[in-house]
Amino acid sequence: MRRFSLFNATSLTLGFAFLYIPMIILVVYSFNKSKLVTVWAGFSTKWYGELIRNDIFLDAAWVTFKVAVMSSTLATVLGTMAAIVLVRAGRFHGRTLFSGMIYAPLVMPEVITGLSLLLLFIGIGMDRGVLTIVLAHTTFSMCYVSVVVSSRLVSFDQSLEEAALDLGCSPFQAFRLVTLPIIAPAVISGWLLAFTLSLDDLVIASFTSGPSATTLPMKIWSSVRLGVSPEINALSTLMIGVVAAGVITASLISKRTAVRQQREERAAERTEAA
Amino acid sequence: MRRLVLIAIPYVWLLALFLVPFIIVFKISLSDTELSIPPYTPTLDFSAGWAGFKEFLAGLDFENFVWLTEDDLYWKAYLSSLKIAIISTVLTLLVGYPIAYAMARAPQEWRATLLMLIILPFWTSFLIRVYSWMGILSQEGYLNQLLMSLGLISEPLIILNTNTAVYIGIVYTYLPFMILPIYSALEKMDESLLEAAEDLGCSRFSAFWLVTVPLSKQGIIAGSFLVFIPTLGEMVIPSMLGGSKTLMIGKVLWEEFFSNRDWPVASAVAVILLLILVIPIILFQRNEQKQREAEG
């Protein structure tokens, strides 16, 4: 049996302490009674109450949620299409440019993406608001989705699709009945990734939104400039909680599908053997 | 036909919302600043046809780029971004390597959990993770409180709004990018190589240095690029944790755009940042390709 050596145990402890202590402090101090964030004055949930009564935060949260749902759904559809094109469509004119445009946004500084999209929206005279943020978020998160989905597409057996086509499926039916169920876990995690990317984004949203739409990160940004505040701590705690719940649910779902798949495979092996 | 539609939809989307905007940035970087809406000139007038296009081209020049080289604010910002990005990449490597190493040498049944714990912060808001350090590093913050109560210091340290805080912020937020590739390189390593090295007379330290480190080279390179590339254009961390003296090009671009409303200069800053980034991005891709070939 392997055990942790003293050195390894120490570096893991220090490493995880470094990664998690700042967030733990944030969560703990969101329940602080005092207005002074760094002085503990007893337990209280009053900052959560303040937060719920604060219309500006509620509006921003609603805008952020709308943008995230719309852009991640659009990005999942477009990103999955792009992944299929990358993995299955073979050669076509402009393929290099296409794959370049898929990978470039992943390494592009956000300030440049944001600036360029803003200049586009102004150039074509589009009013900035929820719609422009959705367009911007869709564009960069579809690239993440397509990377996630294409890695799944590469690894699965293409002959399954061919069999469906041979058995009389139309290409669309073959996609819906064979390909989609197989790549579904990747599509779902792509959607989740796009959703969190959108929830999280400050820079691109700031460039592409107008006065009519303020997202939560933009609101946090403008209040944080004035220093640490207990309300922001409470808000951050809620956001951390939502994300943690989401990640845990997603990992439970993927674990269950993995178990089911294993069971089906084993059943299939047994029937083959018999 | 169906294949064409499948290709065309994402293709057109990316052309319209990724490539065309870049061309616009490039074009505006060659324009002059104007006090009008939009605040630059010339603007392309499609109704004037070819003559209009020629006139438009004649109005473009490299004035903004010349101006960038003359004003030393920009030089300093590019150089200091490079410096900050290099130093924080090295720091992240120094912090990340022991963690990745310990994860790869952990008992098998622990590894999935450890990996999950490294990935989890990725899902939490970047902004919140940076924000959490403001309360720790400020003058009356938790770190100073702790150090003073332990009697290690008598006066609070000034960390927030300095470059030190920026380094801490970058190492903190980009650590998982460094750990994951190094971990995956170390995990594949055959440990009997270490035993062989020790049998052949290496000390444990020199075995680590001569066997483990070279075998994890690909992971180190990949991780370093994954930290270096986004750090170079970073805006949030220097603005939140850094001070007025912290110069980083992402922050300069942001201020040029939102405070000074000088679009042509902001665009020129963006074009040069992109040119600087092209080199590490190409090197990174070559490294990835080499790795794939080595595996395939």
Image: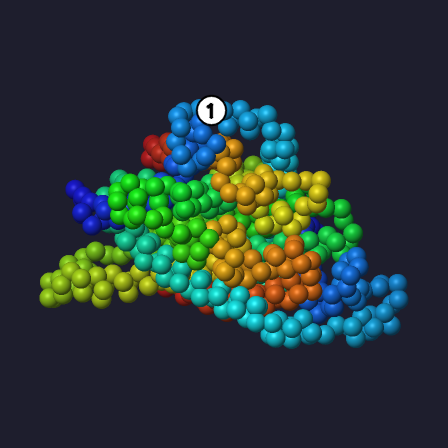
Image quarter for residue A198?
top right
- Is residue B292 positioned above or below A215 on the image? below
- The residue labelled by disc 1 is A45
Residue at horizontal 40 percent and vertical 59 percent from the top: B88
Residue at horizontal 55 percent and vertical 62 percent from the top: B249
Q: In the image, residue B288 lies at what x, y percent?
A: 43, 62
Q: Is residue B152 left or right of residue B125?
A: left
Residue at horizontal 16 percent and vertical 64 percent from the top: B197
Q: In the image, residue B151 lies at what x, y percent?
A: 26, 44
Image quarter for residue B132?
top left
Q: Amino acid at mark 1?
A: Thr
**Residue A172 shows in the view:** no
Which quadrant would the C terminus of chain B be assigned to in this image? bottom left
Residue at horizontal 42 percent and vertical 46 percent from the top: B138
Within 10 Å of disc 1 (Cα), the crowding (few <14, some 14-19, many 20+) is: few
Q: In the image, residue A196 lies at what x, y percent?
A: 53, 41
Q: In the image, residue A107 lies at what x, y percent?
A: 52, 58
Circle 1 SS class: loop
Q: Nearer the viewer, residue B63 or A188?
A: B63
**Residue B45 shows in the view:** yes
